[in-house]
Image: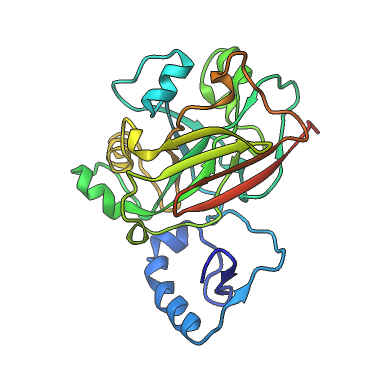
Amino acid sequence: MGDSTYVDLSDVVADFDEAFFADGGIDRIAPVVVERAARGNVSAFAGERIGAPIARPHQILCIGLNYRDHAAETGMAVPDEPILFTKSPNTLIGPDDDVRIPRGSTKTDWEVELGIVIGRRTSYLDSVEDAREAIAGFLVVNDVSERAFQMEHGGQWAKGKSAETFNPAGPWLVTPDEIEDVGALDMWLDVNGTRRQTGNTKTMIFDPFFLVHYLSQFLVLEPGDLVNTGTPPGVGMGFVPPIWLQPGDVMELGIEGLGSQRQNVLGPR
């Protein structure tokens, strides 16, 4: 199997949702995938839509300013502890679905990020090492943001993060055993073929395992929950003058070993 082929599990799995992860679904389907692939029961993609690799989660938790160089480009201080905000779960879309600029937007922006999917109900983890056992896998996310809504309307950042289509995810959920070092993955994002973001997860301030342990001290994490872990430099608001997404733009982004996404940008409804 590769980026161009897949094993059909529709007769085995209803959805990749909270119940699937809570019931040890990944361990259950692994031998089925191996057996079917060995028999050649593999299909080639032929233009089908690829949805997000997880169902709508119970919550999407986001970490702000988690790359030192991104904090610098925004003019904000490097945080002493993770900055936490939430994003509406109904922002989740597939990796190649259209992204729609919301009504009244003047400053819609892009953010390539590493996403963490929680694998079991988790709270009050004893150590950072314990967090490794709570993670089902990793994926590419685009934390699309409306900066005027986020920064200029008071209150919580969620207003600039929760418009429809603002969380493309996937294409793949990659289990931790498939990643040699999640702390050393190259990241990139292009707009209309021009490279805007170039980064690596090694410049994170708080790594994925620390984040899951940290969050578990304040929240109950449910199976299938999504954690967006922050973005490297190169977002639109960091340019002088800033660059904002416009209808007709095309975003392409990816993370080493986790696949790539492509979104067309549409105007408001």
The image position of residue 60, as x and y in percent, is 49, 40
Relative to 254, is 205 on the left or the right? left
Quadrant of the rendered image containing residue 235? top right
Which residue is outermost to the front?
194
- Extreme residue in the left direction: 126
Percent from the top left, x then y, of residue 208? 33, 42
| Between 20 and 198, the one nearer to me in the picture | 198
Badge count: 0
Q: Which of 63/34 is in front?
A: 34
Q: Quadrant of residue 110?
A: top right
Residue at horizontal 58 percent and vertical 14 percent from the top: 240
Please tell me which residue is depicted at 46% across the width and 61% down the height of the picture.
19
Q: Is residue 165 above or below residue 23?
A: above
Residue at image coords 39%, 65%? 23
Is residue 58 shown above or below 4? Answer: above
Farthest-out residue, right = 269
User: x%, y% of residue 34?
Assistant: 43, 78
Q: Residue furthest bottom?
A: 39
Scheme of image coloration: rainbow
- Which image quarter is the C terminus in? top right
Determine whether, in the image, residue 162 is placed left or right of residue 73. Answer: right
Position of residue 96 in the picture relative to residue 83 (left or right): right
The part of the image, by quadrant, that contains residue 186 is top left
Position of residue 51 measured from the top left corner of the image (x, y, whole percent): 62, 56
